[in-house]
């Protein structure tokens, strides 16, 4: 009779070890990131956003300076066309001469507009601003929809 408790103990031990390995683990297979790692990731994306924003601001300043130069050259060309036409009109006597002066003025203005448009196209597209990172984008959108539905009630 003495063997019987040993057999029961062995059988119980085998059963429990088999049961423990067949049960799913209590720990999550994909642990959620700790708050410090989320904060560190957010800070790094925030730092990168600040660098990108400074680059964007610098690119916009440079573009603004170039646009000012282009516009001042354009304004000078337009003023020169009007001044030359005014001076030429003082000596024009016949209607044909006056029409020719007006046509020359219109051609000079059209040439200035074409040159300005070509210079603006040469600048390239306007720089795009960087996207601001969000700490908890999904949670914020859920909160917005909840607050909208509450305010409508």
Image: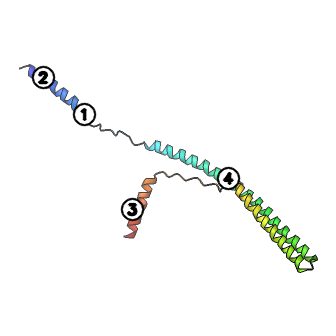
Q: Which badge, 3 or 1, comes first in the chain's sequence?
A: 1
Quarter of the view holding residue 110:
bottom right
The span from disc 2 to disc 3 (Cα, nearest Å) is 62 Å
The span from disc 3 to disc 1 (Cα, nearest Å) is 42 Å
**Badge number at residue 7:** 2
Mark 3 highlights which residue?
146
| Badge count | 4
Element type where label 4 sits in the image: helix
* Quadrant of the snapshot with the C terminus: bottom left
Judging depth in this view, the residue of 66 and 143 nearest the camera is 66
Quarter of the view holding residue 73:
bottom right
Instruction: Say if mark 1 contacts mark 4, CB within 8 Å.
Output: no
Q: Which badge, 2 or 1, comes first in the chain's sequence?
A: 2
Badge 2 crowding class, 10 Å Cα cut-off, few under 14, some 14 to 19, many 20 or more, is: few
Q: Where 37 falls versus 83 (above or below)?
A: above
Element type where label 1 sits in the image: helix
């Amino acid at each position: 009779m003495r063997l019987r408790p040993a057999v029961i103990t062995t059988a119980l031990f085998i059963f429990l070890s088999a049961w423990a390995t067949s049960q799913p683990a209590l720990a999550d297979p994909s642990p959620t990131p700790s708050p410090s790692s989320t904060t560190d990731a957010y800070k790094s994306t925030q730092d990168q956003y600040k660098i990108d924003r400074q680059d964007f601001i610098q690119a916009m300043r440079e573009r603004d300076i170039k646009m000012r130069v282009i516009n001042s050259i354009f304004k000078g060309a337009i003023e020169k066309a009007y001044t030359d036409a005014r001076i030429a009109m003082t000596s024009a006597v016949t209607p044909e001469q006056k029409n020719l002066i007006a046509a020359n003025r219109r051609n000079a203005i059209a040439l200035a507009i074409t040159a300005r448009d070509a210079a603006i196209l040469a600048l390239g597209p306007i720089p795009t601003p960087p996207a601001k990172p969000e700490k908890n984008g999904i949670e914020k959108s859920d909160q917005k929809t909840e607050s909208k539905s509450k305010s409508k009630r």
